Image (spheres, coloured by chain):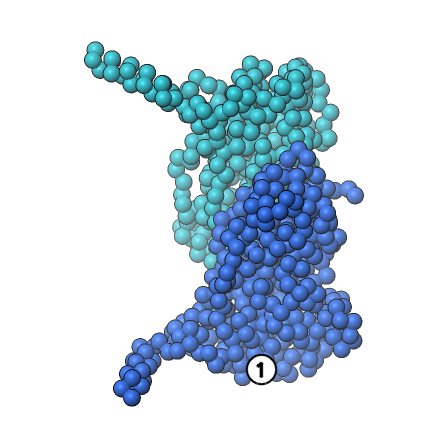
Chain colours: A cyan, B blue
Amino acid sequence: MKQTKTILALAAFLSAIGIAKAASDEPISPIKPPASINVGMVELGKKLYFDPRLSKSGFISCNSCHNLSMGGTDNIQTSIGDKWQQGPINAPTVLNSSLNIAQFWDGRAADLRAQAGGPIANPGEMASSHTLAVDVLSSIPDYVYEFRQVFGKDKIDIEQVTTAIAEFEKILVTPGSRFDLWLLGKKDALSRQEEEGYQLFKNAGCVACHNGEAVGGNSFQKMGLVEPYKAASGAEGRSAVTGADADRFNFKVPTLRNVELTYPYFHDGAANTLTEAVDTMGRLQLGRKFTRTENASIVAFLKTLTGEQPRFQLPILPPSSDQTPRPLPFGK
Amino acid sequence: MKQTKTILALAAFLSAIGIAKAASDEPISPIKPPASINVGMVELGKKLYFDPRLSKSGFISCNSCHNLSMGGTDNIQTSIGDKWQQGPINAPTVLNSSLNIAQFWDGRAADLRAQAGGPIANPGEMASSHTLAVDVLSSIPDYVYEFRQVFGKDKIDIEQVTTAIAEFEKILVTPGSRFDLWLLGKKDALSRQEEEGYQLFKNAGCVACHNGEAVGGNSFQKMGLVEPYKAASGAEGRSAVTGADADRFNFKVPTLRNVELTYPYFHDGAANTLTEAVDTMGRLQLGRKFTRTENASIVAFLKTLTGEQPRFQLPILPPSSDQTPRPLPFGK
């Protein structure tokens, strides 16, 4: 009895000074730091992520299109691949991608390991092959030792390469956004406009798709539900994976974490600004025309989703040896 | 008298335990850390160095071709420019470039400030213009504040941009190589083979051009003194700047600091390995065919010139605003 009273008094006190319990009934939850990582593997994966020798040209690394100085994207409508080929789709951010239900806009890779192998061997992206990538790495003594240390195996293989990259990508989460602080009880973390924006984001129905830890990334949805979307890209989305006609124009709902940094927007990168993206989404997905004030509130809320960007030292890559296959940027 | 005796005894003692006085009579001197830098300007310059928005495409930054993960070069024979244009010449390392007599292989820029403006506006490289670059930066609020803080002026101009990049480049020196430790008195820093390689490097005459703090970088010399060099590139060197026929095929002597990391070699990037480069230099510049053992000793010595690579956090770039001119990677 006395204990209950004490707890109630404590709760009243905490509430009075603004430390309320975490709002666990919200449809968005705070980003958690990675629970468990293999530190040596993360360090190796970081080098591989920054190493352009995984591309045929020796010029394109994972970081070229998923630039960790720029919200884990390239901020270009569609990416630039080998020989300046124009990519078919907007590069999604690598930040918080470990929280996605699947990888790529159409979800064709089940996880980050499966994803990492894709661009390396895609003729329109890094244009190498898994064999060549492994040959290159195996010719570099300091990589050989590091792979051996991390994986305890004699020979490097592509699974080790993608496993290390995926392990590095686990640390690319962005906790600590103002919105997360607000969720965690810091009630003055948001301005009135930002909080109004969040209420509108929920009430208007945006949250039906953009929810959970990543504010998206956990379902596939049709682009153009109420009104058809006139895409700047020929990508047809999920149907390319399932073969089902019903899945045409179904795309993975993108995370809205750090959305302030990941412009331009949509799978075709057609929306340059958040204002434009919110307007289009309201009309096409919800059949609702947001007023200027409403739009501005939602945009203000979205900008509170920018978290702490991963901070680490630029990796120094081990040099090629005389035996390393040389890059082929020009000619065949 | 007593003092002299003490000093002599101390010298004998230091010599006995292997701490000799610095070998100030050597033709190569240890790299010094930067004497004085403007810390705020370095931080701003670091961001600019990594910012691909200084290019028309939004894809190419200073770091693309002078990659600080890879010895300050791109390790490609000739660099890749806007729309995958093939550059005319091998990208020289940015490491220790503050020690160069002038910038570019033909020395057409007097200093790093003058250099930094070149690639931004070169249609074959970053393909932007100084006006566009300044417009882009001026549209990004966090850059506007940072320039104001660093330069104390209302408006950003291209001189501030190149000054900040050049200030950042001042910290890209690489002291602490094993060879420098040896010069500084740590006599066990080199193996016998490496020390023999250095003696041969001096005796054979390599040191006539490759000397000083940067082991090069301080003079222009003809490529192909004894035997003509069959270049893979049409670049004619210093004559493009002076107009003098006598300067044809005169190039800035490259620094040999970190040469283990800056392959491929020569202004046309035609030599893939140090073994090949040493052989060619011996024959063409000195009229001397090094034996395999001699070549290996010189290569072993050259690898002792790898210094501590600049270590810093990958910069996080401020996001574009709705007003920022968008990159134009494709089309006009």
Q: Compared with residue B12, is residue B166 higher up or lower down, i.e. above or below? A: above
The residue at the far bottom in this view is B1
Q: SS at mark 1?
A: loop
Of residue A254 and residue B246, the one placed in the foreground of this image is B246
- Snapshot quadrant of residue A277: top right
Seen at 50% across and 33% down, the residue is: A307
Q: Compared with residue B22, is residue A209 higher up or lower down, i.e. above or below? A: above
| In this rendering, position of residue A79 left or right of residue B305 | right
Seen at 59% across and 47% down, the residue is: B152
Q: Position of residue A153 (x, y in %)?
A: 42, 51
Q: Position of residue A205 (x, y in %)?
A: 57, 16
- Snapshot quadrant of residue B98: bottom right
Where is the N terminus of chain B found, in terms of image quarters? bottom left
| In this rendering, position of residue A233 left or right of residue A56 | right
| Subunit bearing disc 1 | B
Q: Position of residue B52 (x, y in %)?
A: 64, 46
Seen at 71% across and 58% down, the residue is: B87
Label 1 CA crowd tier, 10 Å (few <14, some 14–19, many 20+) = some
Q: In the rendered structure, which amino acid carries the disc numbered 1?
A: Gly
Residue wearing tag 1: B205
